[in-house]
Image (cartoon, helix red, strand yellow):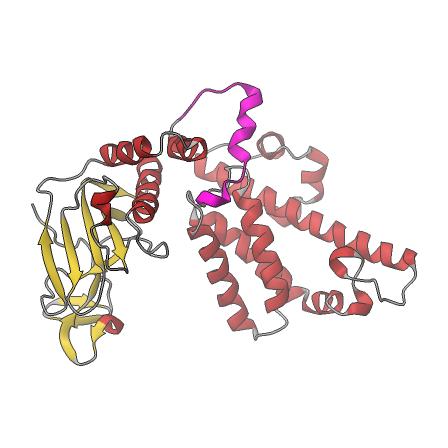
Amino acid sequence: MHFQAESIVLYEEANGRYYRKKWQDIYNVGAIKRIHYNTTYVKNYLIIDIDNDNIFKYKENNLPEPNFILKNKFKQGGHLFYVLEKPIFSNNQKELDKWRILQKEYTRIAGGDPLNKGYVGKFFNNTEDFDYIKGYDYYHNVDFLLNKIQFKTANNQAYNRKINYYEPKKQEKTKKKTTKKNFNEYGLIGEGKRNDYIFEKTRKYAYIKILKIDEKQFIESVKIYAESLNENLLIPLFNGEVKATTKSIIKYCINNKKKIKKYNNSDDKNRGIMSLENSKKTIKQKQKLGAEYTAKIKKEKTILKLKKAVLNMQEKGLKINISSLSKYSKISRPTILKNRASIDL
């Protein structure tokens, strides 16, 4: 059995391999501390980052034995490594969802760092900083690992629904709504809520940032914010969907910076979200401003929903026209015709 990393991040060459420079020991350039074991395109390992002195907590909670452990020599903690039976590629969404569930739940049960995403691990050849502890001799099957934690939390209804999220299941029409519920306690946003969640959070963030930093920093900041929201979802959206949402918000904010600034001034905001309690404007003026603002937001959301529908239809290879788009997006034909120019249809 081998434990060689499948991919190394390209940054600095050392001994015929490339490593991240920032992970090198500044006192000993030859001591590489971390490398990429998993990448965006392929997953071969579960990597659990333990930052406390109870690195063997997985035994107390009856988790399967890792294949090997790299324990810190000079401080507490270390990394647990489970080597998967088969590589999981990015185009296999079902298996990728299983990997994400395993990475998150094994980290929780073993008392690991919840911020660890499972891509980077301690370098197995670095004997100066880490002790190598040999464990289980055979590859781990993904479904076997899943069954272990599903059995452990059999009484947790919300958790079991999350475990079965990737499995096709026949339900009555009245029960389909359950998939749209928010299980924020478990990091799960329902399938029908993920786009709205990222759009609303990113939009509000962007409206504040556009007035505080320059355009280049603003674009980068909004992209990072949206990507971080998506990464923290149990089952993230495709990168293309997040990019489309981010691009739309950035474009609107840059083109309407003056309007956003105007709405952020107390005299020109409407009631509620626009805080016009102390404004000198009449009620009719406030209501007019509020109606204009609401109409703009509604139009933005409609256009964004249509763009996402077009993107999804293209990915599925569906024929795109007014009728099919109306049926797929559940938006009326007149509305689509009115916004046709904005969605390049």
Q: Where residue 235 sits in the image (x, y, percent)? A: 42, 42
Q: Which image quadrant: the N terminus? A: top left
The quarter holding residue 175 reads top right
Is 31 situated above or below 152? Answer: below
Q: Where residue 245 sits in the image (x, y, percent)? A: 54, 52
Is 93 situated above or below 219? Answer: above
The segment highlighted magenta reads 168-186
Res 44 visible = no
Is 342 situated above or below 217? Answer: above
Q: Where residue 109 sits in the image (x, y, percent)? A: 31, 45
Q: Residue at x 22, y 64 (%)?
A: 76
Q: Residue furthest bottom?
A: 27
Q: Observer-nearest residue: 96 or 102? A: 102
Q: Which image quadrant: the C terminus? A: top right
Asked if residue 242 lies left or right of residue 110, the reply is right
Asked if residue 111 lies left or right of residue 123, the reply is right
Q: Residue at x 66, y 50 (%)?
A: 300
Res 22 visible = yes
Q: Observer-nearest residue: 27 or 251? A: 27
Q: Residue at x 59, y 68 (%)?
A: 209
What is the total number of numbered labels drawn onto the structure image?
Answer: 0
